[in-house]
């Protein structure tokens, strides 16, 4: 793996030379938030949407990041330039910072960490998904949802899904309603409707999710954010998962298949937007 240059809380260091403060609350206790931001042809993909969500989340957990949107954007652009990487993913983490004493009393400077990596190769699709009850995993739901550094339940579900040969697990809650994937959002198409779980269920309002909803409205799909019962999934005509890293991927599950006509059209429109960087 290439020795990329990362931003480690005011310092620029390569992978092989990177260290983190062992008393940083983010690494000690998962006390912080993160954003995964895509860039193509050296251009950040909707950074303002990511930073808006980040700062809203930081307000909720009361971390005071004393940098502006512009300062953070400049750091994101600088890491791309320093690594001369054309397209890839940036992971921006903001922690409560280094603690010296009880972490709950800490009111110092927030920690900022940015790492970079290339995009992963898009898998052959449709990809397989499996459905898991949230009660089997330590899933933490916030309302409104935030991108917490605590992903224990999500990663355990990913491991279980991998053992089943699945690309992604999809959760459903105690009421039997679909919520989201371990690290992605889920969409269904039924007739002329694009269906996706609402954020009132604690679903993360993904940036790519928001963009897909906007595209769908432009191609005359009626978008509904509703409660989707696990018992209704085989009644769906099409389905796909989405995230910043993979964009949109058609998906299947055991005993169900689709021709993905509308999904492929949405994917084509989304890919054009990503690679041409045309604003919505």
Image (cartoon, rainbow, N blue to C red):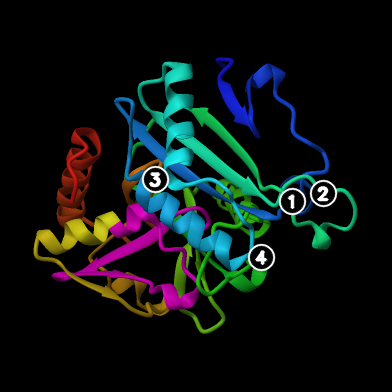
Residue furthest right as drawn: 101
Q: Earlier in the sequence, mark 1 or mark 3?
A: 1
Q: In this image, 140 relative to 264: left or right?
A: right
User: How busy is the neighbourhood of tag 1: few (under 14 within 10 Å), some, or many (20 plus)?
Assistant: some
Give the residue number, with chain letter if any, for mark 1.
108
Real-space Cα separation, disc 4 to disc 2, in angstroms: 30 Å
Do the residues bearing badges 2 and 3 touch, measured as CB atoms within 8 Å? no
Q: Secondary structure at mark 3?
A: loop
Image depth: mark 4 or mark 1 in front: 1
Q: Earlier in the sequence, mark 4 or mark 2?
A: 2
Real-space Cα separation, disc 4 to disc 1, in angstroms: 33 Å
Snapshot quadrant of residue 147: bottom right
Do the residues bearing badges 2 and 1 touch, measured as CB atoms within 8 Å? yes
Snapshot quadrant of residue 261: bottom left
Taking the magenta stretch, the answer to whether it contains residue 116 is: no
Q: Residue at x 63, y 51 (%)?
A: 155
Q: Which mark is residue 243?
A: none
Q: Which mark is residue 99?
A: 2
Image depth: mark 1 or mark 3 in front: 1
Residue 265 showing in the rendered view = yes
Image depth: mark 4 or mark 3 in front: 3
Q: Earlier in the sequence, mark 2 or mark 1?
A: 2
Real-space Cα separation, disc 2 to disc 3, in angstroms: 32 Å
Q: Residue at x 63, y 55 (%)?
A: 151
Give the residue number, with chain letter if any, for mark 4.
137
Where, quadrant-wise, is the N terminus in this rendering? top right
**What span is colored magenta in the figure?**
182-210
Q: Secondary structure at mark 2?
A: loop
Q: Earlier in the sequence, mark 4 or mark 1?
A: 1
């Amino acid at each position: 793996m290439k020795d990329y240059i990362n931003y480690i809380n005011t310092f620029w260091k390569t992978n092989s030379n990177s260290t983190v403060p062992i008393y940083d609350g983010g690494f000690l206790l998962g006390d912080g938030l993160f954003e995964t931001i895509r860039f193509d042809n050296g251009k950040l993909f909707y950074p303002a949407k990511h930073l808006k969500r980040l700062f809203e989340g930081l307000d909720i957990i009361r971390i005071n990041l004393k940098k502006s949107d512009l300062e953070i954007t400049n750091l994101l652009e600088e890491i791309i330039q320093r690594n001369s990487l054309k397209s890839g993913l940036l992971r921006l983490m903001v922690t409560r910072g280094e603690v010296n004493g009880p972490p709950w009393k800490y009111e110092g400077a927030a920690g900022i960490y940015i790492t970079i990596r290339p995009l992963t190769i898009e898998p052959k699709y449709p990809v397989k998904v499996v459905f898991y009850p949230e009660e089997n995993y330590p899933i933490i739901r916030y309302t409104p949802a935030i991108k917490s550094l605590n992903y224990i339940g999500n990663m355990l579900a990913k491991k279980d899904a991998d053992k089943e040969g699945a690309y992604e697990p999809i959760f459903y809650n105690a009421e039997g309603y679909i919520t989201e994937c371990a690290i992605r959002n889920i969409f269904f198409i039924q007739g002329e409707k694009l269906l996706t779980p609402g954020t009132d269920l604690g679903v993360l309002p993904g940036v790519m999710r928001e963009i897909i909803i906007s595209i769908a409205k432009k191609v005359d799909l009626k978008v509904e954010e509703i409660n989707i019962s696990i018992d209704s999934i085989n009644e769906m005509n099409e389905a796909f998962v989405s995230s910043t890293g993979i964009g949109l991927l058609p998906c299947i599950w055991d005993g169900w298949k689709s021709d993905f006509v509308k999904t492929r059209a949405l994917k084509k429109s989304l890919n054009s937007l990503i690679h041409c960087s045309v604003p919505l």
